[in-house]
Each structure stands twice: as C-alpha cells, then as structure tokens.
Amino acid sequence: MSAPLSFSGKVVVVTGAGGGLGKEYALAFGERGASVVVNDLGGDIKGGGKSSAAADKVVEEIKAKGGKAVANYDSVEDGEKVIQTALDAFGRIDILVNNAGILRDRSFARTSDLDWDLIHRVHLRGSFLVTRAAWNHMKNQNFGRIIMTSSAAGIYGNFGQANYSAAKLGILGLANTLAIEGNKYNIHCNTIAPTAGSRLTQTVMPPDLLESLKAEYVAPLVLWLCHEECQENGSLFEVGAGWIGKLRWERTQGSIVRHKNQSMSPEEVREKWDQICDFTNATKPANIQDSLQTLVEVLSQVEAGEGLEANPTSALASASGINPTEAVGIVLPQMTFSYTHMHCILYALGVGMSTKEPDHLRFLYEGHEDFSCLPTFGVIPAQASMFEGGLSSLPGINFDPTKLLHGEQYLELYKPLPTSGTLTSKATVADILDKGSGAVLLLDVHTYNNQELVCYNQFSVFIVGAGGFGGKRSSDKAVPTVPAPNRAPDAVIVDETSRDQAALYRLSGDWNPLHIDPSFAVMGGFKTPILHGLCSFGFAARHVLKHFAGNDVSRFKSIKVRFVKPVLPGQSLQTEMWKEGNRIHLLCKVKESGAVVLSGAYIDLYADPGASVVTAPAQTGGLQSDLVFAEIGRRIKDLGAELVKKVNGIFGWEITKGGKMAAQWTIDLKTGNGALHKGPYTGKADVTFTVADEDFMDVVMGKLNPQKAFFAGKLKVRGNIMMSQKLEMILKDYAKL
Ligand code: NAI
C-alpha cells in the first residue's frame, strides 16, 4: 500500500455536518489532520427550526480525538458567513463539501411554491452561495477541492421528489461548469450521489437496510476526491454500501433527418425514430466540444448532400466484410484514460525496467527528482480505442477479432507525457489496404491533455483473410518503416525478459488472453503464451533512450516499428542500434534464436540535449505555409498596432502534412503591437485552426473558399469561430506571393 492520505495543513468546510453523511465526512477529515469547519443549521428535516447542538457535538467529537474543528451554525444560504468562519479560525479554505440538505417530498400535483423554493434554496442556491464565497480564495492559492452532493433521485427521477430531483440535478450542472472554470486554477469539482441510512432516508428505507448502509461507506470517496493527489475533475459518482461507480453520458449514433435546402418534418423524425434511439455503437461525448463537433460534422454532411439517403452500400463491399468507402474516415467514440504515477511505474516494470539499474529509478520511483513517464507509455491511452472502441462493429469493418495481428506501430510525442492525469484519445480509421491475403487497417489516434495534443499513434493492424475486396495496396497515410543501414551497429544492448514479463505488461491494459492463457495461446497457433509486441517495442525504445539520450524523455520524438516475430517471456532481447543524425535505426532480435522481432524500426530524437520541454513538434520540412507565415510576420511588423486594434484576438494554427501535425504557429493580435511566433500559444488561443499544408495554400491563394473547406472537413476550427472572420484582414492579398 502507498502512503496514507493526509490532510494535514488543509482547511475543510463540510456543510450540514451535524449529522448523517456530513458528520461522517467531518470526523474522517478531522482524523486525518485537517482543520474542519462543522457547519449545521440544526433544523428539522423539512428545513424548519434551528439549533447549535448538532454542530457542537461533532466539533467536540473531533476535538476529543485530537483533531481541530470549529462550529458554524449559519444556513448555507449565508454562504459568506460559513466560509468566513474558516478564514477567521484557520486563515484559509482548501476543501468544501456541499452536503447540507432537507426534504419536502410531495407528489408533483401537490407540490407548493414553498416546497419547491425551500428545496432549491437549501440545495442548489446553498451550494452556489457557499461555493462562490470560497471560490476566489481557492483561485488565489491555486488549489481547491469541491464536492457537490446530488442524488439518484435527480439522476433517475423518483416519485414524489420533483422539487428535490430538479435541485439535485441542477447541482450537477453547476458542478460540471465549475470543473471547467476551475481546472486551470487546480480547483477540482466532483459530484456524488450517495446512498446511506440517515434521518433523510429513514422514511423511505426499512430499518435493517438503514442500519447497514452506513455513512462511513461514503466518506472514503469524498476524502479521496478532495485530496491534492487526486486529479479527478468534473465527474459524477454513485456511492453506497461500500461500492463506488462512475457515471457518464451516452449518446446514440443518431440520424440525420434533413435534406440540404429542405425543411425538416416530424414525419421524417417518425421514420428515423428507431435509428435515433438505437444505442448500438453509442458514443460517449465527454464535453460540450464533442457535442458541438457532431453538429459541425452533420452540417458538413448535409451540405455535401448526404443525410437522409446517405450510406449507399458500396459496390466494393465483399465477403471479406471490409468496405473502405464506408469505413475510412470513421471517427471512433472518444476514449478517456485517467492514470497516476502508479500506472507509469507499472508500465516501466512491464517493459523490463529494474531497480538493479540505478538510472532506472527515475522511472520507478515517484519521489525521484526527475521522475518521468516512459515515452512509449503514449501507446497506452491510445490503445483503449482499439480494445474498447468497438473497432469490429463499425460500419464497413466486419471481421473476426481473433484474426487480428498487430503489424506496425508509430508513436510521436509533442511533449513529454505527464506522470498522471486524464487524457482523451480520438481515433479515426485513416485508411484500409487490400494486401490480398488480408486487409491492413490504419488507425490514427490523437491523444489530448485537455485541448493540447500530447501524442499521435498510428496502429497498423493486419486482418488475416479479410483481403480481396478490390482495394488499393498502399497508402500515403501510412507512416513508412525504414531499413537499418548496411553496416555494423553503433551500439548493442542485450536485456532479459522475465518469465512473468507478459503477466506484468498486461496490467498496463492489454488483456488479450493470448499473452497469459496457455489454452488460448494454443488456439492462436502458439505453443505457449507470447509476449506483447508493444512490450518488446517498449524494451527497444528504452534501450535507445538510455544509450543515445541519457534517459532524457524530453528528447524523444517518435518511434516506428514493424512487428515481425513473437517473443516468449523469458527470452533475451538484443537491440542493435545505428545512429544517423537524430535518427536511431534499430533492429531487435531474440538473442537465443537470432530471430528478428522488430524490423524497419527507428526512433527520432529531438536535437537539443538541453531542452527539457519541447514546445513545438519539429518541422517535417518543406512546408509551403512557412512562406505565408513569414509574410504574415512581416505584415504584423509593419501594421501590428493597427491590426491589434481591429482584430483583438489570438489565432493558433496547426498545419498538418500527410495527416500528421507538421508545424504550429501563433498569430497574436491581442497583445502589444502584435506578434507571430512558431509553436503553440502558451495560454489559450481564441481560435485554433487545423488544416493541411496544401489546403492552407489553396485557401490563401483564393482557390479554396474557407467556408467550403470548413464544411468539407478540411479546415477544423476550435474555439471562437466568429473570430475567424477577422482573419481576412491578415490573409487577404496573398495571391501575389
Ligand atoms: P441528514 O439530514 O442526516 O443531514 C443533512 C444535514 O444538513 C442535517 O444535519 C441538517 O441539519 C443540515 N442542514 C439542513 N439545512 C441546512 C442549511 N440550510 N444550512 C446548513 N445545514 C443544513 O441527511 P443525509 O442523508 O446525511 O444527507 C446529506 C446530503 O446527502 C444531502 O444533501 C442529501 O440530499 C444527500 N443525499 C443523501 C442520501 C442518503 O441516502 N442519505 C441520498 C441522496 C442524497
């Protein structure tokens, strides 16, 4: 077990802490070193009356156990006073648990104005007022943890609780926005829907159940969510009886019910009803951008004449189950991956790091001053798209998952991976190739830390027996392998894998039984379980990182490998390396048999050995857009002040080439006399465009209408879309370039 979670030095306010759940939280925080403000109005269950006794008793109990606590008897409707008590007694406020609550259950028809208003005043408005009073203090100290208390009645509805359900779901909406606004100040806001025996539930639960659903089974979740180590933000949990589960939204694929230039009719809605409500391949939008993105995509599909009669079955569809016209371009449901230092360490152990080597400690010990996450960990958040993303149930891709082989892998990092956090991955079917004996599927996965692109993976998977559908044999979307130079290697590292290497590696998220279950391995045609290809990949990458980059993760740019033959756990891996500039070619063999395991492989390193943070992806070279940006730079020098006045905005640009990010630019027409610089904006750009180098040129040369480019999906826009209209002022007149 890792170190116990301490709250020493933290100041916590728990509202409604005179009894029930709140009391349990207050005691638990007090026991773990926090200074606690025990707020409770001491009224009755319906919101009537007032007494100081409830809060006082809890304060006494905390103090009796050696803890620090003060009482506050104000209603949560006096939020300022509640928080002021924390400031007066302890000088700060770090953690706020909005918990106070009352009930006024009535069937809807009998709900009075007072029933409605009182519930809203205590639950929703009370949570708002106490939180608002604490907010700026948390913001200024760049730390805050807030818990909102919702209810299953709000999430699912419950007879006789219209007032309470509405307020409780209102609280969730409040929390969702606070999580977004607070994130950059390290203020995290999460919501719980608890179930526990208390005076609130004694009328609805039988006594036995009431007794066994203890409030102490809820408190540990609240404490973890409020700890500084916990990075969870904007989430909703159901909790009770010792069980905790996380909730999220799910959305059907839906259906476009509109023709271009035609009005929509309710009859068409009726016609499409089954499809609108069909949860097969449901997506899980994680934020409002995901939601809006769908609408933008719908607009472009309708504009392109798709929609009602869309999805004609292509003539290419064949018995192979692969139909590229349907499948290519499909975006898989977005995946979210949350991790801590523990996952980084587990992964490092999985790819053979050991405390036997002193320089491995920075990957194995979270307390190390240079504690880092191995760059190849970048495949882990992305691989969820393959395993959980429902790849085999997408339109145009029907195959037997047991026929799938991992052929090649490309990974590029745009900055070192954080050692903990929540990353989201967006996967797109980039292309499908017909190799005769099988099909090759290229899956591009972009992984983001909030809005920032952290890494790009290209999974290349071979589907045995799925070829012969009349498709092309090669693709310009594929990142190619490169053969090693024809000379003796510059360095060779030999490393043993352990008997349990696959058993250890799989804990990082690849649960395929082929790597652990002997009978499954036999079914797959192997004598014994084999090592994961991505495990050998991790071994080889760390060999290069150690030998050529002194284990400096910020120097790692990208890796490409082809998986040739399997490795058995316990065999030794021999990595042969050739240095050619910043590219390290590599070949990986099983030492005992000489069999080549990884071929055509290379790792590109960033050049500057001193650089600790890579701010921009390196140029792939020869971008036409460079010319335009150079001219924009000159124009800003001449007319900067005037443009800043007119435009007042910051524009981010992501220029891609061959589907990969090739350059980033920032045009700052908001600060000073304006500026152009290469790389992403350190703050938040007002609007960010993603466009291919050649499309960018077509737009500036006037060959491609920007609006059309947008609707055709060639120009992607994030942020304040209205701001893009002002771009004309800087982009016009480039045809002369
Ligand atoms: P409880 O009645 O034991 O505790 C609520 C406390 O809030 C009481 O001590 C009460 O005096 C205090 N309070 C009420 N109005 C106040 C105000 N205006 N200002 C300050 N304090 C006030 O109830 P329980 O069960 O511990 O509930 C805690 C929270 O959990 C509530 O928000 C409740 O809606 C929620 N909840 C509880 C569930 C359960 O199964 N117990 C189920 C779903 C939600």
Image (cartoon, helix red, strand yellow):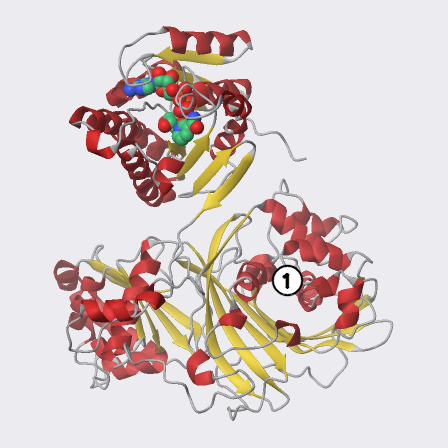
The answer to whether any part of residue 530 appears in the image is no
Q: Position of residue 313 (x, y in %)?
A: 40, 85
Relative placement, left or right, of 253 versus 427 is left
Q: Quarter holding the N terminus?
A: top right
Q: Name the outermost residue toward the bottom.
A: 470
Q: Residue at x 34, y 33 (%)?
A: 140
Vertical comparison of 582 with 552: above or below: below
**640, 650: nearer the viewer:** 650
**173, 489: nearer the viewer:** 173
Q: Residue at x 73, y 54 (%)?
A: 504
Relative placement, left or right, of 720 versus 202 is left
**310, 503: nearer the viewer:** 310
Label 1 SS: helix
Q: Amino acid at mark 1?
A: Ala
The answer to whether any part of residue 296 appears in the image is yes
Task: State the image quarter where residue 672 is shown.
Answer: bottom left
Q: Residue at x 75, y 76 (%)?
A: 565
**103, 176: nearer the viewer:** 103
Q: Quarter holding the C terminus?
A: bottom left
State yes or no: Cβ of the residue under disc 1 lies below 8 Å from any atom of ligand 1. no
Task: State the image quarter where residue 208 is shown.
Answer: top right
Q: Residue at x 52, y 58 (%)?
A: 611
Q: Name the outermost residue toward the right.
A: 592
Crowd rating for badge 1 (residues with CA inside 10 Å; few <14, some 14–19, many 20+): some
Vertical comparison of 177 with 393: above or below: above
Indicate which quadrant contains ligand 1: top left
Q: Position of residue 175 (x, y in %)?
A: 34, 39
Q: Which residue is mark 1?
A: 549
Relative placement, left or right, of 391 versus 234 is right
